Image (cartoon, coloured by chain):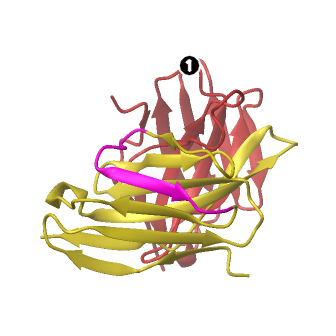
Chain colours: A yellow, B red
Amino acid sequence: NAGVTQTPKFQVLKTGQSMTLQCAQDMNHNSMYWYRQDPGMGLRLIYYSASEGTTDKGEVPNGYNVSRLNKREFSLRLESAAPSQTSVYFCASSSWIASSGANVLTFGAGSRLTVL
Amino acid sequence: DQQVKQNSPSLSVQEGRISILNCDYTNSMFDYFLWYKKYPAEGPTFLISISSIKDKNEDGRFTVFLNKSAKHLSLHIVPSQPGDSAVYFCAALKRGGTSYGKLTFGQGTILTVHP
């Protein structure tokens, strides 16, 4: 039962470097998300993909790009990393629960990124 | 503008006693509320939820209460156990349309349960 798998778990970058965070889910979920967690801020939505082939901006999209490669995979790219992007990043996928009419998110373990 | 607020950064309780975690929201369009629990170095895990048409939902030791008029919800854990020590996030959602699972989270409350 892998659920949502994120790689890498830790990464240190220098300002201006680029990198891609990878995420894969094996639950056949349609929707996938990238959140960031910062102290005192909770989790904030960066980008989401409602279904394969679609992506949309969340609350804090600036400085990021995403790719929904297929139904399983959703990657987050930092083209030119900045210290303000130092954070813990969580990928999630969701299924729609008919009884509640809501999506319940399943999260990965997180990727801790430090930008120097 | 923080639409979901957890004003208590931390809470400490004795094992066996009740833990009460609070959450306030400002957006009256939210109609579904969830609590997530997070251990260090792990992702948040879903704990319990409640629809705006209800005022209470119970699951074992966990009960969520919703007061729509006050835009306030709370999570009660009875009895509290040391394994409940974690960060608890309140989240809100407006269902339907293009909302999908776009949750708005509070800042989190660190719960410590002492043996």
Q: Position of residue B75 (x, y in %)?
A: 59, 48
Decide if residue B90 is in sight here: yes
Q: Is residue B59 left or right of residue B62?
A: right
Decide if residue B21 is in sight here: no
What residue is pinned by disc 1?
Answer: B28
- Residue at 71% in and 46% down: A103
Q: Is residue B22 left or right of residue B69?
A: left
The image quadrant of residue A83 is bottom left
Between residues B113 and B29, which one lies in front from this camera angle?
B29
Amino acid type at mark 1: Ser
The segment highlighted magenta reads A59-70
Above or below A6: residue A29: above
Q: Position of residue B73 (x, y in %)?
A: 57, 36
Q: Quadrant of the N terminus of chain B?
A: top left
Q: Is residue A61 magenta?
A: yes
Q: Position of residue B105 (x, y in %)?
A: 47, 44
- Residue at 47% in and 68% down: B86
Q: Residues within 10 Å of mark 1 (few under 14, many from 20)?
A: few
- Residue at 59% in and 51% down: B35
Q: Position of residue B5 (x, y in %)?
A: 41, 37
